[in-house]
Amino acid sequence: MTDLADLPGYQIRRLQQLAVAVFATRVAQAGFDLTPVQFGALTAIADTPGLDQATLANQIAIDRVTIGGVIDRLCQKGYVTRSINPEDRRARLLELTLTGKEILSRVTPVVIELQADILSSLLPAERDMFLKLLKKVTTDGPADIRQNRP
């Protein structure tokens, strides 16, 4: 019989669940109503103003259908505006509002601080190595899977 604890995919999924739970708890305690995906979207939009929705989905590894709902919620909260690209009417361009910029600047330190909580059972050197290995797997993993990400 297979022990789930010995399967990398199972452990990765458990770590993702832990990371989301820590994020949700710490961000809510700080008074913010954001999910990890919403934070990722805000950060990517801040880094590339005028980013289109399809490119954003690719950058944060979310499928195009899901990103539409994420952006809808960020627009409802007043954090993002969405407009039609005059050069390609199918594309939607995204910009942070002043409120979105302010929320992002206030929540980012909370998110940075909670990262240590996610890997709190590791020593600092182990954390560095773990992050390097995660980056290697996600960057250098099977090409057919990386190219077909959501």
Image: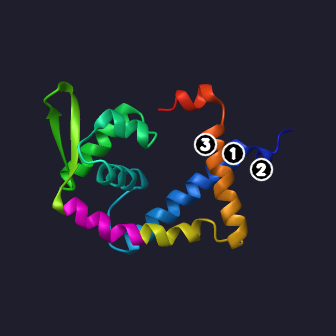
Quadrant showing the N terminus: top right
2 and 1 marks in contact (CB < 8 Å)? yes
**Residue 121 visible in the picture:** no
Q: Is residue 77 left or right of residue 104?
A: left
Could you say which is closer to the camera, residue 52 or residue 10?
52
- Residue 11 in the image: state x and y as whole percent: 69, 50
Write the residue at 43% across / 55% down: 36
Counting every numbered tag in the picture gives 3
Name the amino acid, label 3.
Thr
Q: Residues within 10 Å of mark 1 (few under 14, many from 20)?
A: few
Write the start and end of the magenta stretch as one range: 99-109
Name the amino acid, label 2.
Ala
Write the residue at 13% across / 29% down: 86
- Residue 129 in the image: state x and y as whole percent: 70, 60
Where does label 2 land, which residue? 5
Where does label 1 land, which residue? 10
Q: Residues within 10 Å of mark 3 (few under 14, many from 20)?
A: few
Question: Which SS class for mark 1?
Answer: helix
> Does the magenta run of residues contain 101?
yes
Residues at marks 2 and 1, CA–CA distance in whole angstroms: 7 Å
**Residue 127 visible in the picture:** yes
Write the residue at 30% across / 40% down: 69
